[in-house]
Image (cartoon, rainbow, N blue to C red):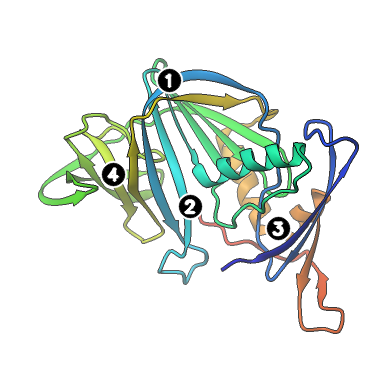
């Protein structure tokens, strides 16, 4: 369901997104987190991408959402030294907005369902950097860790075919959830979406046993491209402190939104047609890492 109906962006000073001061107002049917335009002009090229997998991520919008109604497309870029994993829809929208704002053409509202983290895996030192984008602001928080080593249990009985590739099944407990994946030995790369790595072939599908999340590959490309890291101002934070902070701003979403300086109004049936955001608003919180 599209919850964000109107967004007004006022740029004070020249149309240079790096120097512009943005005053943003949202009019919503119901409260929801969303992302604002950010600087996409500067980046560092880290590696050459030899294979790109595009996955559809389906996930819950609420406790009762067993149909996993929220959808995003996420790209896994595989290189010799680095892998990156991020929302394709969010990146495409950000790039379009960066260009359009600079050319005074307005901008596109970011779809509700976009995932706001980017993951950068380094094969040389087995490290993972996770950049988390805060809603309603251009701020980013990053934590680093060692790439987890997953203890997979392989099944010789269950098989499937995904995108024309024969797949086998493996299961493992990862960050508090039980996961089942379908990997193909025909592409002998030990990678997959999110943290679903280390199997005996490329992971084409994965889902947790409580029906909260499902990744399923729907595209594969060997067209040459690059793996890049944007030069955003990232605040460093320990992983556990980030998780505490993330849990807290979901629980106190109304207060968090107000603290960012954004103006949010909610449509209603009153004569005025809207009311201010309730500071007691709490956003559904169901992270991949339980």
For the residue pair 146 and 119, the one nearer the viewer reads as 119
User: Which structural element holds mark 1?
Assistant: strand
Circle 4 or circle 3, nearest the eye: 4
Percent from the top left, x then y, of residue 208?
34, 54
Circle 3 or circle 1, nearest the eye: 1
For the residue pair 76 and 251, the one nearer the viewer reads as 76
Most extreme residue toward the right, as rendered? 13
Crowding near pointer 3: few (<14 within 10 Å), some, many (20+)?
some
Residue wearing tag 1: 48
Is residue 251 visible from the viewing direction of this image?
Answer: yes
Q: Which mark is residue 133?
A: none
User: Which structural element holds mark 4?
Assistant: strand
Residue wearing tag 2: 72
Residue wearing tag 3: 252
Percent from the top left, x then y, of residue 28?
72, 66
For the residue pair 136 and 22, the one nearer the viewer reads as 22
Circle 4 or circle 1, nearest the eye: 1
Q: Quadrant of the N terminus?
A: bottom right
Q: Is residue 52 above or below residue 214?
A: above
Mark with earlier residue (2, 1) = 1
Quadrant in the picture for residue 280? bottom right
Distance, label 4 to label 2, CA atoms, is: 16 Å
Residue wearing tag 4: 204
Most extreme residue toward the left, as rendered? 157
- Discs 4, 1 touching: Cβ within 8 Å: no
Distance, label 4 to label 3, CA atoms, is: 36 Å
């Amino acid at each position: 369901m599209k919850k964000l109906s109107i967004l007004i962006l006022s740029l004070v000073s020249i149309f240079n997104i790096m120097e512009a001061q943005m005053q943003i107002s949202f009019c919503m049917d119901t409260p929801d987190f969303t992302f604002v335009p950010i600087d996409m002009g500067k980046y560092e090229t880290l590696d050459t991408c030899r294979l790109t997998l595009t996955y559809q991520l389906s996930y819950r919008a609420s406790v009762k959402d067993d149909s996993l109604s929220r959808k995003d497309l996420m790209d896994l870029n595989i290189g010799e030294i680095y892998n990156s994993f991020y929302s394709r829809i969010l990146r495409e929208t950000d790039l379009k907005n960066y260009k359009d704002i600079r050319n005074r053409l307005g901008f596109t509202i970011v779809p509700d369902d976009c995932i706001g983290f980017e993951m950068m895996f380094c094969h040389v030192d087995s490290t993972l950097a996770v950049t988390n984008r805060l809603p309603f602001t251009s701020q980013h928080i990053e934590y680093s860790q060692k790439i987890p080593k997953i203890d997979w249990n392989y099944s010789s009985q269950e098989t499937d075919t995904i995108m024309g590739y024969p797949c086998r099944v493996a299961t493992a407990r990862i960050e508090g959830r039980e996961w089942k994946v379908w990997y193909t030995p025909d592409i002998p790369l030990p990678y997959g979406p999110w943290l679903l790595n280390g199997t005996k072939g490329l992971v084409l599908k994965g889902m947790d046993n409580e029906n909260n999340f499902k990744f399923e590959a729907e595209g594969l490309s060997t067209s040459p491209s690059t793996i890049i890291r944007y030069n955003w101002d990232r605040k460093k934070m320990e992983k556990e402190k980030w998780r505490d902070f993330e849990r807290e701003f979901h629980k106190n979403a109304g207060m968090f939104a107000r603290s960012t300086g954004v103006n949010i109004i909610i449509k209603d049936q009153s004569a005025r047609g809207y009311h201010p955001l309730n500071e007691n608003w709490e956003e559904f919180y169901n992270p991949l890492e339980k």
